[in-house]
Amino acid sequence: MRVVIAEDLALLREGLTRILTAFDIEVAEAVDNGPALLPALLRHRPDVAVVDVRLPPTFTDEGLQAAIAARAEVPGLPVLVLSQHVEPLYARELLTDRRGGVGYLLKDRVSDVAQFVDAVRRVAAGGTAMDPEVVSQLLARRGPLAALTPREREVLGQMAEGRSNAAIAAKLFVTEKAISKHINNIFTKLAMPPSDDDNRRVLAVLAYLNA
């Protein structure tokens, strides 16, 4: 697996590189600014891009815009966003393109090495990796969720983090059949057709919640 990293903080950039290398993940290039990111992504076409939203020179949304531009040139390019804060606008912009894996993690989560590496691999495989805090804030933004039961909200949060029905069932100590029923209820209440595609269903739910 090959990765391109975009992070302006030298210590974090070096730390990410060392972590990934230790898990036999090749870092094709690590850049520290927005203008360098797009050429790097197009040059290497990595299995996943690990991108900070705010990069020099303006520290606004250079990282995200470069990632979105790269996905236009390389459809389905997997992108894992790192951010210091929950920024729903950026999450929505990334999620509107449902091709390829996507993830959104808070930088604090990088301290959990196993979780970070798992997120990188999941996104590279076309899956979804959403930070629980990002999910929580996205869920809080939509009134229609008032129709969901507490358990359905819990299941929806687990879905948004990228977990399969089996994984959700194991975490909540219930059967897969019960989870399937909850998910069907969620889609019905949100006026969305059910889908067996875990990645598409999560992206659709998050895009809907943050619309």
Image (cartoon, rainbow, N blue to C red):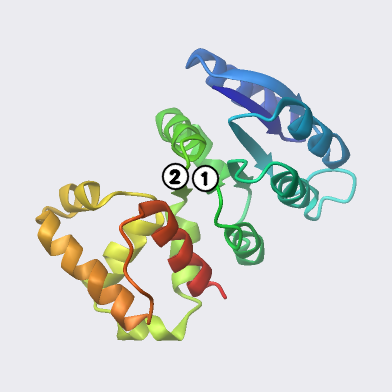
4 to 97, vertically: above or below? above
Disc 2: CA contacts within 10 A as few (<14), some (14-19) or many (>=20): many
At 17% from the left and 55% from the top, the residue drawn is 172
Q: CA distance from mark 2 to mark 1?
A: 5 Å
Question: Does 5 sit left or right of 123 as displayed?
Answer: right
Total marks in image: 2
At 56% from the left and 51% from the top, the residue drawn is 99
Q: Label 1's element?
A: loop
At 47% from the left and 17% from the top, the residue drawn is 23
Q: Quadrant of the C terminus?
A: bottom right
Q: Quadrant of residue 29?
A: top right
179 to 166, vertically: above or below? below
Disc 1: CA contacts within 10 A as few (<14), some (14-19) or many (>=20): many
Q: Check contact, mark 2 vs mark 1: CB within 8 A.
A: yes
Q: Specify the label residue 13 is tagged with.
A: none
The amino acid marked with disc number 2 is Gly
Q: Quadrant of residue 20?
A: top right
- Can residue 137 be seen in the rendering of this structure? no
Residue 120 placement (x, y as % from top left) = 50, 34
Question: Does 144 sit left or right of 189 as displayed?
Answer: right
| Label 2 or label 1, whichever comes before in sequence order | 1
Q: Label 2's element?
A: loop
- Can residue 131 be seen in the rendering of this structure? yes
The amino acid marked with disc number 1 is Gly
At 52% from the left and 45% from the top, the residue drawn is 101
Q: Specify the label residue 127 is tagged with.
A: 2
Residue with the mark numbered 1: 101
Residue in front for this viewpoint, 161 or 7: 161
Residue 185 placement (x, y as % from top left) = 24, 76
